Amino acid sequence: MASSASIAVADSVWRQMKSSRCVSDDNLAILHFLFGKNFERATIIVDQGGVKRVSGNPSCRVLFLVAGESKKEEYVCFPEHFCTCHSFFFDVVNKGEQLCCKHQIAVQLAESVGAYKEISISDEELALILCRI
């Protein structure tokens, strides 16, 4: 129950940030309280330009590619539901210790302030990315 309330609070903050396209100190404080170290790590990813919004053409289907710490890896991420990183499966799904991984938070943050790289590829290329999951 607490996790659904926390997600609702976070969703409200993300919506507020999207509508204003800015981040207030209150927003930062709330998100840090909810996500802790994962939020801090997500801000680094966004600051370093590590979020790509990939859209398929002509379908307009979207997924996100998020840089890993090594910069050599990218994770496929659907911010509200799934990430291919180990932390998502271990900390979020298996142990339930986190609400979401840093990559999911990075996507939400990047979307909220428009800090992502936009990439358009064919639907076939998008399908190949999804097949690697």
Image: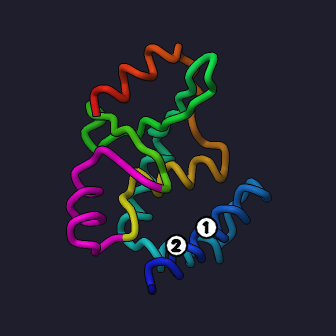
Residue 100 lies in quadrant = bottom left
As drawn, is 13 to the left or to the right of 66?
A: right
Q: Which residue is mark 1?
A: 11
Circles 1 and 2: CB atoms closer than 8 Å: yes
Up the image or down, 28 lies above or below 120; here it is below
Residue drawn at point x = 50 percent, y = 34 percent:
52
**Quarter placement of the C terminus:** top left
Residue 109: percent from left, percent from top: 56, 54
Type of residue at label 1? Asp
Residue drawn at point x = 25 percent, y = 39 percent:
70
Label annotation for residue 92: none
Q: Which residue is mark 2?
A: 7
Residue 131: percent from left, percent from top: 31, 26
Residue 87: percent from left, percent from top: 25, 57
Type of residue at label 2? Ile
- Start-end of magenta stretch: 81-98
Query: Dot 2, how many residues are within 10 Å of its Cα: few (below 14), some (14-19), or many (20+)?
Result: some
Query: Dot 1, how many residues are within 10 Å of its Cα: few (below 14), some (14-19), or many (20+)?
Result: some
